[in-house]
Amino acid sequence: MQKVMALAEAVSRYVRDGMVIAMGTGLESCIPFAAGHEIIRQRRRDLVLVGPISDILFDQLIGAGCVSKVIAAWVGNVGAGIAYNFRRAVEEGIPRPLAVEDHSNLTVALAVSAAAMGVPYLPARTALGTDIVRDHERMREVTCPFTGDRLLAVGALRPDITILHAQRCDRHGNAHLWGNLGISLEAARAAETVLLTCEELVDDAVITSDPNRTLVPGFLVSAVAEVRDARAGGLPGLARPDGARHARTRGVPEPPGRGPGGTASPPHPAAGRPGELRFLRTAASCGRARSPGAR
């Protein structure tokens, strides 16, 4: 069955207010920026975002007022630092209060993997004795029934939808991915729905010629949209991370009374690419985008 559609149609059809969305699952590569920007354009609200490391995409969605909760190990760009909008939302409730379910990369992977396997939790030794476990709604200390050892049970986390970006796929949703995958495959199997964006839509024969790279099978995918995307965060085999772009987001002087690492608004990371001025104007019309340097 052909599943190709415009990205705007895919987001309109499959992304609704209040959904739990896994995206940015590739540990700062293959980040679906275009899908995130389309979610902002369509003014989705009260979203719960899931991902180990999301590059700067989560921060854009938070700054646009789309997000009520983040389930993640890190929000920001590892090279550039913690995300401005994320920090401001947590510390000051701007543009809205933000709940955070804190994880390590491994515990969020275990939670999503448990959902992918159809089990209520996965046991591990990781994070025992750390502050992450303290009063955590998804983690419990348990005793192994076989050895009597103390273990950590990490509860399953099932996204309503997973949004992935792939190097290429066919019209049926069979996708070739390579490079750092993070929890992309687990998130695809765990979710109720998968929306797939790709750099290139190819003939079926291209996909079947290299079956070892077909890591997301089409039967998991509900929609496919061809968009040239993800290059700011890096796309293995096609583009290196755009470090200069991230540096620009850190280039605004701190407001009076703020030291290094404060919460000044940077220039929008999307500025300067085709179509993105329209995106910023749309976000501003929603009362959510602010000018560079504004708080």
Image (cartoon, rainbow, N blue to C red):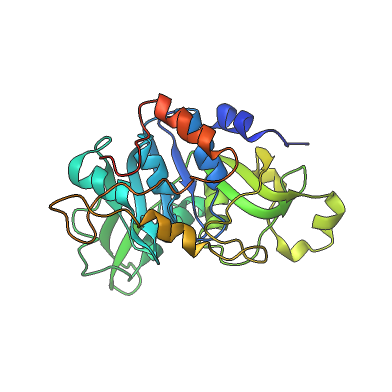
Q: Is residue 136 above or below residue 3?
A: below
- Identify the residue shown where x is 67% and y is 40%: 225
Residue at the outermost right position: 205
Along the line of sight, the residue nearer the viewer: 116 or 291? 291
Residue situated furthest left in the rendering:
257
Q: Is residue 289 left or right of residue 98?
A: right
Observer able to see residue 111? no
Q: Is residue 273 above or below residue 279?
A: below
Query: What is the number of callouts on the image?
Result: 0
Quarter the N terminus occupies? top right
Does residue 278 appear anywhere in the picture?
Answer: yes
Viewport quadrant of the C terminus: top left
The percent position of residue 15, horizontal first and vertical second, equals 52, 32
> Which x, y percent locates residue 45?
39, 30
Q: Quadrant of residue 78?
A: bottom left
x then y, percent, for residue 120: 41, 51
Task: Give the image location of residue 18, x and y in percent.
Answer: 40, 31
Q: Give me the residue at 50% from left, 41% from top.
A: 36
| Viewer-proximal residue among 160 and 153 | 160
Foreground of the two, 239 or 236? 239
* Residue at 50%, 55% in the rendered image: 25
Q: Is residue 14 above or below residue 241?
A: above
